[in-house]
Amino acid sequence: MKHLPNKIRDLLEMIRFSHTIFALPFALLAALIAWNTPAADGSMFAFRLQDLVGILACMVAARSAAMAFNRLVDRHLDAKNPRTRNRHLPSGALTVPAVAWFTIISCLAFVLGTLLFLPNRLPLLLSLPVLGVLLMYSYTKRFTWLSHAWLGFALMLAPVATWIAVRGGAVTVDLTDMMPAFVLGFSVLFWVTGFDIIYACQDYEFDRQAKLKSLPAAVGVTAALRVAAVCHFVMIALLVSLPTVSQRFGLETGLGGIYLAGIAVVALLLVYEHLLVRPSDLTRVNIAFFNVNAAVSFGLLVVGAIDVFV
């Protein structure tokens, strides 16, 4: 038992717990917009503390399950890759049974967390399909270079699922009511796809040798970075369109000038991210990956919240 704190620390380091900041702010932004956007008939959606707790619990549990499962599935590849051979499973800091149990417990915590949204049963009914999407990502790079887009789709579920959880119990969930969530979700898809492509450039040589499917391995680092830039351009376009598209479907999100000013800052941050990484110099990928993207997601939450409540 005296080693338990160290094991907990190792588990949190293994799943990169601090990286939860990537998707969580988008889920919380979706929740803020959902609570403050009247339905087409003018009805409002009441804030419930248990919904907020449910969002936090499900986001942490789902990401923990996905990351732990990924480390399990990739442990043999990680042991061969010079960049990852010191991770917790290849190095022996954690055992396979310990990580397997952590994955199972995280999956159960995610499913149980959806009970907080009752009487809205949609989150519970969709919990297993969502877990399936999250866990399947770990296998995608074995058969498709679209693995980056799969990860983007998995994180896209954060704002979409949050919208369903917050509004699904009050109205029938339909495409019209979910339009803000879809626009926000697709912006997450392109954002994550772009930065995962950048991150994968580090493993260009290893992926080719191991015959793994990644965009850099398929088309080269230079072309892959161009695709990542296009993805981030599409992300910005989607975020800019969010208030207008929502209005066309009769939904007033409350997002305006402050939000759009925040998007301009986000665009500059993404330009900076791409300036940090060059085909001939990938030494600053981790700075681009964590520091810039953490600022992007948290910054969007802040400006979105200010604009909604001001």
Image (spheres, grey):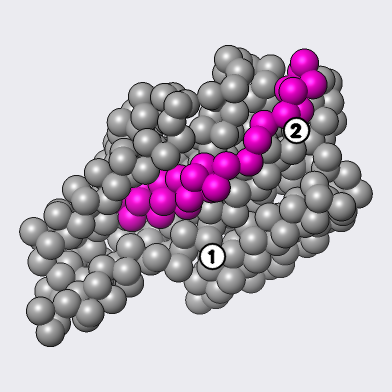
Q: Report which quarter residue 230 is drawn in.
A: top right
Q: Position of residue 129 (x, y in %)?
A: 34, 28
Residue 39 in magenta stretch: yes
What amino acid is labelled 1 in the image?
Answer: Phe
**In the image, residue 204 above or below residue 46:** below
Eyeballing the image, is 154 above or below 25? above
Placement of the N terminus among the 4 image quadrants: bottom left
The residue sitting at 12% across, 84% down in the picture is: 2
Dominant secondary structure (helix, strand or loop) of the stretch shown in magenta: helix
Residue segment shown in magenta: 38-65
Choose between 12 and 135: the one closer to the eye.
Answer: 12
Which labelled disc corresponds to residue 69?
A: none
Q: Nearer the viewer, residue 128 or 230?
A: 128
- Is residue 35 highlighted in magenta? no
Label 2 sits on residue: 37
Where is residue 303, by image quadrant?
A: bottom right
The spot of residue 295 in percent (x, y) is: 65, 66
**In the rendered view, would you say 310 is above or below 51?**
below
Which label sits in the foreground, 1 or 2?
Answer: 2
How many numbered circles are shown?
2
Q: Circle 1 sits on which residue?
A: 289
Q: Secondary structure at mark 1?
A: helix
Residue 248 located left or right of residue 45: right
Q: Is residue 31 above or below residue 122?
A: below
Q: Residue at x 41, y 51 (%)?
A: 57
> Three-letter amino acid code at disc 2?
Thr
